[in-house]
Amino acid sequence: MVQSTLLTAILAFTSLAAAQCGAGTPHATVTGSGNSYTATRGSSNVYTGTDYRAAIQAALDSITSGQRVAVLASGSIGASTISVGSGKTFEGCGTINVGNKSGRGAIESLDTVGANIAYLTMTGNPYFGLRFYGTRDLTLGKINLDLSGGLGIRFERDKAANSNVKMDTITCTRAGSHCVETWNIDRLTIGSVIARNVGECGLLLQKTTNARVGLVDGNNVAAGNGYATLRFANENGKLNGGYSTNVFVDRVVSRGGGRGIFCVSQSGGAQIGYVDLANNGNNAILIENCYGVNINGGTVSGGGEVRLAARTEFANNRDINISLRVDGTTVRESPCGDNTNWNLSGNGGRNIC
Ligand SMILES: *[C@@H]1O[C@H](CO)[C@@H](O)[C@H](O)[C@H]1NC(C)=O
Ligand SMILES: *[C@@H]1O[C@H](CO)[C@@H](O)[C@H](O)[C@H]1NC(C)=O
Ligand SMILES: *[C@@H]1O[C@H](CO)[C@@H](O)[C@H](O)[C@H]1NC(C)=O
């Protein structure tokens, strides 16, 4: 009994250690501080000098697919880019301060298979904190973007598509634009997106199919503009020309800011399990020209109205099912959607079809 308890404790410790940035024996490391950095692969020195970015890139370039770099040092890469190649695991254990390289990511993985950014703490005001396209089997782990501006994570619109992207926990503070913006992903899994004081969206999905998201949690996101804690746009969820349910979000929490949830421009095929929206400065929920959207339950408390709307440029809303308690704000459906099913409770005023 004592032995098995000890064994359990050892196993627990081992798995805890394995779950920490830089744990075990990374194939390459970056150490140092100030204006002195060293990159080491095994027992070989691959960089010594003043340039933090060069040290990180040298470490990444020294490993092969299946291997891992741990950046233990903190520093600043300025307006430049770190590139993570196929099959390589990157662990940013120090704090990586970044600058604004126009149109580019501070960290990129482009046209790769199986790249993994397992840990990252980033500060600064990047154009894009992380930038991706043409990826397959990309993994993002615990990503903490504590920014003073810029866009957190961007999958490009006009480049090669992505498949099988996994993200664990993405936290953004003070991004000027979106925390996470996707285009062109088939098969996306996200644990959580946590957005605090973010200028535009917490999570923005576009032309993304077969997606599963655990939690999107925004506080003071999209204040003063039309974005939202969670937004689907540009035919998000359109799968094989239709809108069968293929985008699943377990839970959306939004406080203050602008909109809570916004579906627009021929998006849909979406099911949201539970919403908890309060005091949003713009529509708590806006669904505009969307097809096949289910909100299965939850609450809206105060804030801007819950609205089903349509622009004339696209077909009207259809197949929208909403089960919701709405207090302290109104629910408006105008124009009437095609096959809207409301299941409402709460004291909010109603103007529905
Ligand atoms: C980055 O610089 C470009 C101009 O090169 C500017 O338009 C953009 O707003 C800047 N982004 C940030 C986050 O400062
Ligand atoms: C909405 O609910 C109706 C009736 O319960 C159901 O037949 C329909 O499949 C649901 N719509 C979607 C998009 O799931
Ligand atoms: C309507 O909402 C109630 C309370 O949220 C829920 O228990 C019930 O399942 C919903 N009915 C339908 C048809 O979705």
Image (tube, rainbow, N blue to C red):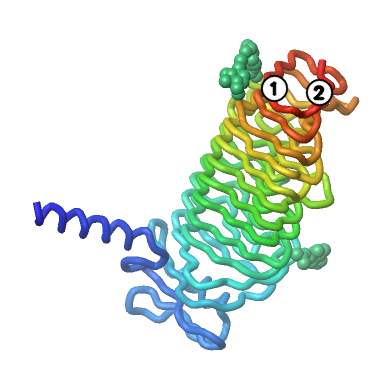
Q: Residue at x 71, y 38 (%)?
A: 301
Using the image as rendered, state which of residue 351 and residue 114 is in the foreground: 351
Ligand 3 closer than 8 Å to the CB at disc 1?
no
* Precedes in sequence: disc 1 or disc 2: 1
Up-down: is 63 above or below 348? below
**Quadrant of the frame with the C terminus:** top right
Q: For numbered disc 2, what is the local secondary structure?
A: strand
Q: Which mark is residue 257?
A: none
Q: For numbered disc 1, what is the local secondary structure?
A: strand
- Disc 2 packing (10 Å; few <14; some 14–19; many ≥20): some
Asked whether the residues under the numbered discs 1 and 2 touch, taking CB atoms below 8 Å apart as contact, a structural biologist would say yes
- Which residue in the rendered view is the most extreme toward the front? 347
For ligand 3, give the image quadrant.
Answer: top right
Residue under label 2: 350
Using the image as rendered, state which of residue 323 and residue 8 is in the foreground: 323
Find residue 334 and report its horizontal and vertical position in percent.
Answer: 86, 23
Find residue 131 and report its horizontal and vertical position in percent.
Answer: 64, 56
Q: Residue at x 74, y 28 (%)?
A: 347
Residue 93 in sight: yes
Residue under label 1: 344
Residue 154 in sight: no
Q: Amino acid at mark 2?
A: Arg
Q: Is residue 13 left or right of residue 257?
A: left
Find residue 241 and report its horizontal and vertical position in percent.
Answer: 68, 22
- Disc 1 packing (10 Å; few <14; some 14–19; many ≥20): some
Q: Amino acid at mark 1?
A: Leu
Q: Is residue 214 left or right of residue 123?
A: left
